[in-house]
């Protein structure tokens, strides 16, 4: 038996979405062509854009531009914001995804930006400063953390921004919350990825009223309102819109099932291993259901992920894009700076409306077998 518990990394395509992708993927769809087929493709593309805007609660479809991935979206936003010859001042914490933090590091080395580091707490949230220390042009604050599932303090940030930096730009990584939580329509620029919501990989979007402030990153044609050259993948856009629609319309049913599966998982893990051996990383009351991060005493997260994979359980030591790099998660390190063992021991478990009790039972059995065997070896040594 196998158990896939890595849904924050990517999701399988919904069969209904796959059917739509197969139908439209067989057609020649270039929305820039003048002939009838091209104009029909244009209508499909714009209808998909309108659906996504409506589902996200945006006022205008022109506030949605398609990209290839969340990583491209984040890079485009941080590199493409109009700033003339001035250095861009950005405030962000280490809790942001590496597509944000790595880009900021490069821009800072190139002297194109100054990165003001916001701190974080053990609960897994960014600490919004009490006073406004320095003016920033851009604030990066995600909705839900990709490694811990912790919701970020959006209400506190909104209030703080109104009082201290009303005209700055808020960049919101909504990759993990799309279709599950309310999209912050007051974010100036947000980004989403199709493959996180049971849609096809290879398409994502940037959304929000701040789009008009972005300089083009890809040149060569007038596509995406002259902001991103290249023939739009119409079939992928249609499938993306359908996946988001299914997420929104089936949200409550999916959420209830996810809650049941992870409650079952946690109760069995704590019953068999004990609270002194297992630590849930972050404040559980702030966690969006479906993503959890656990540390196990005396065990490195990467070692445990490999051991579980050998037994047919697929999980992650953190962000999937860091796979193969044996290092402590910057996110857990920021949360637990004085507890290196806990930070190094983090393992992410993710649940879906597709997860079954049989999978969960199997995963717990394999997890406990590995950990209890390891405990026994440590006692005998």
Image (cartoon, grey):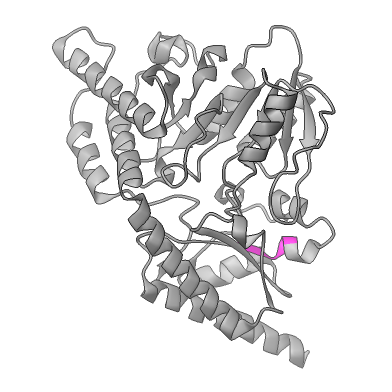
In this rendering, would 324 be left or right of 46? right
When asked about the image quadrant of residue 71, the answer is top right
Q: Can you see residue 3?
A: yes
Q: Where is residue 113 in the image (x, y as percent from the top left)?
A: 75, 22
Q: Position of residue 268 (x, y in %)?
A: 52, 80
Residue at image location 21% in from the left, 14% down from the top: 38
Q: In which quarter of the image is the C terminus?
A: bottom right
Residue at image location 53% in from the left, 77% down from the top: 267
Q: Quadrant of the N terminus?
A: bottom left
93 over 10 or under it: above or below: above
Asked if residue 40 lies in the magenta stretch, the reply is no
Residue at image location 30% in from the left, 45% down from the top: 249
- Given residues 305 and 295, the one toward you in this image is 295
Residue at image location 45% in from the left, 64% down from the top: 259
- Given residues 184 and 334, the one toward you in this image is 184
Where are the magenta residues, as a range?
Answer: 343-347
When asked about the image quadrant of residue 217, the answer is top right
Q: Can you see residue 317?
A: no
253 over 196 or under it: above or below: below
Q: Where is residue 183 in the image (x, y as percent from the top left)?
A: 48, 37
167 over 262 or under it: above or below: above
143 over 149 or under it: above or below: above
Residue at the extreme bottom:
380
- Given residues 295 and 179, the one toward you in this image is 179
């Amino acid at each position: 038996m196998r158990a896939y518990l890595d849904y924050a990394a990517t999701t399988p395509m919904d069969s209904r979405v796959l059917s739509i992708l197969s139908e439209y993927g067989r057609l020649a769809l270039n929305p820039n062509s003048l002939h009838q087929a091209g104009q029909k493709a244009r209508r499909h593309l714009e209808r998909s854009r309108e659906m996504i805007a409506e589902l996200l609660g945006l006022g205008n479809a022109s506030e949605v531009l398609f990209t290839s991935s969340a990583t491209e979206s984040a890079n485009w936003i941080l590199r493409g914001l109009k700033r003339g010859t001035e250095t861009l001042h950005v405030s962000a914490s280490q809790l942001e995804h590496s597509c944000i933090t790595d880009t900021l590091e490069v821009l800072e080395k190139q002297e194109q930006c100054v990165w003001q580091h916001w701190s974080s707490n053990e609960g897994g949230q960014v600490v919004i400063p009490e006073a406004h220390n320095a003016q920033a042009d851009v604030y990066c604050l995600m909705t839900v953390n990709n490694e811990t599932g912790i919701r970020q303090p959006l209400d506190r940030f909104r209030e703080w921004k109104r009082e201290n930096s009303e005209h700055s730009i808020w960049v919101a990584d909504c990759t993990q919350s799309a279709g599950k939580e309310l999209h912050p329509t007051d974010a100036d620029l947000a980004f989403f990825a199709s493959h996180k919501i049971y849609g096809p990989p290879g398409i994502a979007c940037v959304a929000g009223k701040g789009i008009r402030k972005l300089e083009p990153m890809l040149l060569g044609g007038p596509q995406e309102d002259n902001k991103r050259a290249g023939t739009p993948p119409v079939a992928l856009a249609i499938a993306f819109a359908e996946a988001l629609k299914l997420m929104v319309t089936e949200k409550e049913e999916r959420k209830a099932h996810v809650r049941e599966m992870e409650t079952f998982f946690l109760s069995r893990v704590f019953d068999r291993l004990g609270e002194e051996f297992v630590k849930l990383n972050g404040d559980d009351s702030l966690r969006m259901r479906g993503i959890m991060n656990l540390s196990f005493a005396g065990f490195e997260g990467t070692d445990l992920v490999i051991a579980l994979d050998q037994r047919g359980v697929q999980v992650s030591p953190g962000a999937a894009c860091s796979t193969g790099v044996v290092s402590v998660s910057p996110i857990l390190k920021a949360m637990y700076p004085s507890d290196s063992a806990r930070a190094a021991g983090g393992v992410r478990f993710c649940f879906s409306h597709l997860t079954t009790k049989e999978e969960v039972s199997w995963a717990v059995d394999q997890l406990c077998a590995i950990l209890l065997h390891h405990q026994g070896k440590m006692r005998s040594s």
